[in-house]
Amino acid sequence: MKVLFLVTFLLLTLACQVKEQPDRPNIILIMSDDLGWGDTGFNGNQTIRTPNLDMLASKGMIFDRFYSASPVCSPTRASCLTGRNPYRIDIPTANAGHMKEEEITLAEILKAQGYRTGHFGKWHLGTLTTRIKDANRGRPGKTEHFSIPTRHGFDVFFSTESKVPTYDPMLKPLSFDAGAGESLRYGWRAITNTDSAEFYATRYWVGAEQSVDDSLRGNDASLIMTRAMDFMTKSRESGNPFFTVIWLHAPHLPVVADAAHRNLYNSHGLQEQLYYGTITAMDEEMGALWNKLQDLGVSRNTMIWFCSDNGPERDTPGSAGPFRERKRSLYEGGVRVPAFLVWEQKVRPGQRTAFPAVTNDYLPTIIDLLHLEPVKDRPIDGISLKNVLLKGMEKERNKPIGFLFGNKISWVTDRYKLISADSGKTFELYDLLADPSETQDIAANAPGLVEAMKKALFSWRESVEKSRKGGDY
């Protein structure tokens, strides 16, 4: 089915899209890691300096109610590329499962349309080696979850399996200033003397069993963005539009910041300096990206999608804003994330929308914006946001958003959230329009609504389980 679907896309390219090809937009999907809804200036943070994110957000549409498909990273990443709830792909949590070759990815669809495709940063959708010990799961002889980006439609990649330090990503100190708050888990001051450092044990990979051997010193976000921008430059020179996925590690722990970025926050303690400095260092790369797009003459006809993969990590200065809970929770603070879209040629600047959107929506939206045929041979959980983006239409979302994480399940409509922490034995109900902080459980006052939402949720969960068992292939 997958081959037939991609052949159909190629035929559509030859038959229908030739006239439009010179004006096809470039597409960039950017994702930060563990950035909370309240960690950016465009969402009201007055401490962390994010001038470039704020500038870009002002050029397009800010989503006040944008969800990650999961409260942890790997599943959300799967949803971005497939338009499907990650449980369908059997990626229920971080460091579990892998992107299956039977899945149809956005990179494959766009590659069939003549796009050059590149992935840069954190992959976390499978292991990247079977020959050496690497990161969380890569081990000699371990092939079960080996799944590199080039197997899923990407021409080029510069990727890690999982997390790395946000500065000098290949290194960790031999010792930590625990009294000041440094630790292997949380982070440390940037290393100034490599004699006091050792290998962190996670590599960047650029091909099948091909790792990057240089020292990769400096700001990790800059290392990623530099390679992504080089890819865009070469794509521009080739005459092809580009699809670029940039999944930054910041501010996932361990947060590491150099003196210049720590000193921006020297009125705060060291842990805040490291965390805030890491975000500002990442923000600077967003400015560098925009400058590069302008230099290439493609800024007006490039979509820049930005979001976080989940809410902020616990026990960090990260902020979920007014929302309840954090990473690993299906309450709003775990899955409502900062997000915006910039596309100067089509999307009017200075907009904010309260329309509920989710990372599942990337694939169907981009396909619709490019006037391509939707994926029809398997369940797609996302919807097209085309009318929201281009016409400002904010009618009710015609498909609720389902969430699954461990024994936690949730069903979100335009107004209400039904949520359970025991696999559906008991439920809470919240009116997200009147009570976005989820302080008043109204389930007892609306038994009919609870039952109707339960029925829809359970039916959807059955569909997801069928997919997980391979029913879509």
Image (spheres, grey):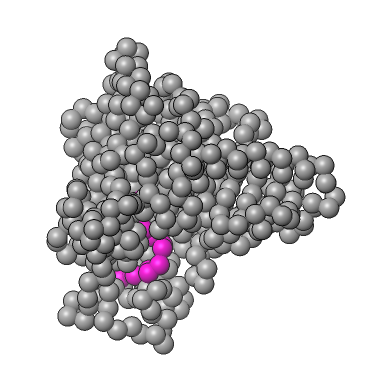
Q: Nearer the viewer, residue 284 or 386?
A: 386
Image quadrant where one finds the N terminus: top left
**207 to the left or right of 115:** left
- In the depicted view, which residue is nearer to us: 8 or 309? 8
Identity of the residue drawn at 51% across and 72% down: 315
Q: Give the x, y percent position of residue 399.
A: 62, 34
Mainly helix, strand or loop, the magenta region?
A: loop
Q: Quadrant of residue 181?
A: bottom left
Q: Position of residue 269 (x, y in %)?
A: 45, 78
Residue 60: give x, y in percent of width and height.
47, 38
Return the x and y of residue 381 as percentages of the image width and height.
54, 36
Most extreme residue toward the left is 214
Q: Which residues are magenta?
A: 247-258
Q: Nearer the viewer, residue 397 or 4?
A: 4
> Is any atom of residue 224 visible in this view?
no
Tell me, yes or no, whether the highlighted magenta stretch contains residue 255: yes
Q: Residue furthest bottom?
A: 179
Q: Is residue 194 above or below residue 310?
A: below
Quadrant for residue 184, please give it. Answer: bottom left
Dividing the picture into quadrants, the one containing residue 296 is top left
Instruction: Determine the residue positioned at 34% across, 59% down.
Output: 162
Q: Is residue 217 above or below residue 126?
A: below
Going 46% across and 39% down the picture, which residue do you hit?
Answer: 470
